[in-house]
Amino acid sequence: MEGVLNLPPAPTLTDFLTVLTGAGVSAESGIRTFRDAGGLWESHRLEEVASPPAFARDPELVWRFYKARWENASRARPNPAHEALAAMGAALAGRFVLITQNVDGLHQCAGSAGVLDMHGSLHRCRCTRCDTHYSMRNVDLTPALPACPACGGLLRPDIVWFGEMPHYLDEIEVALRRTTLFLVAGTSGVVYPAAQFVQMARRNGASAIGVNLEPPDNIACFDTFIQGRAGVVLPQLAAAWLDADKS
Ligand SMILES: [Zn+2]
């Protein structure tokens, strides 16, 4: 039976909670990763549709891939893990930061504010000429190559591709310096630089809590590891912590 016997102590008023989420948190909303699918999309390797050289070579193929992923993400609904983190963020406002490796927008959909989506978002695109950012809803996606409403330049998905620098690294570093509790949920601990964040937080004196279906590769970095589905464990954690915060 899934259930948490020994929950880590609730954050106190002087605590700052930083959370990092990965694919495991979205899996329960039906968002599959390409590792699940053998790393392939329509027989293309992920590098062939998710890298700057791929976009330069065949932007129509890359756009077809991201339009399909955007439609899929738009149909998905947040699950209890997303809702638990939104509740934590609301209760700990001002001493809470949520970092995600997911690009599906489900944390924002659940009501989380200020999400640092370090790998970008399927719901945004940006102009390769003038760098204006758009919500995908606000651009005409009918053409095979969507164009910037402002300057006519070629739009690209606002996704961090292979070989590109993740977003928000400065903001993440500030959070990892400030944080006293670092909660990592639904990541396998293999994608860098995110896998190193737990070490950075611990060097700065934070305690680290891991939640995952399987023990992550970097399990030795955690003070506490809770094995289970994020959609089960995080609501338990939120309930225990937020009740304690009220009393
Ligand atoms: Zn433009």
Image (cartoon, helix red, strand yellow):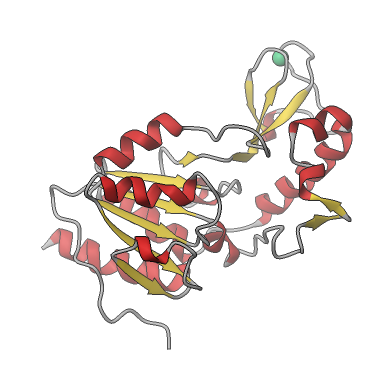
Residue 148 horizontal/vertical position (percent): 75, 19
Name above or below for residue 36 compared with residue 74.
Answer: below
Name above or below for residue 50 compared with residue 190.
Answer: above
Residue 205 horizontal/vertical position (percent): 21, 49
- Residue drawn where x is 82% and y is 51% of the image: 45
- Residue drawn where x is 45% and y is 75% of the image: 228
Residue 87 horizontal/vertical position (percent): 34, 55
Residue 235 horizontal/vertical position (percent): 37, 68
Mark yes or no: residue 143 visible: no
Comparing 234 with 71, the one in front is 234
Q: Is residue 45 left or right of residue 8?
A: right
Quadrant of the drawing holding the C terminus:
bottom left
Of the four image quadrants, the one with ligand 1 is top right
Mark yes or no: residue 230 visible: yes
- Residue drawn where x is 75% and y is 10% of the image: 151
Farthest left residue in view: 247
Q: How many marks?
A: 0
Comparing 154 with 84, the one in front is 154
- Residue drawn where x is 13% and y is 47% of the image: 14
Q: Is residue 30 left or right of residue 236?
A: right
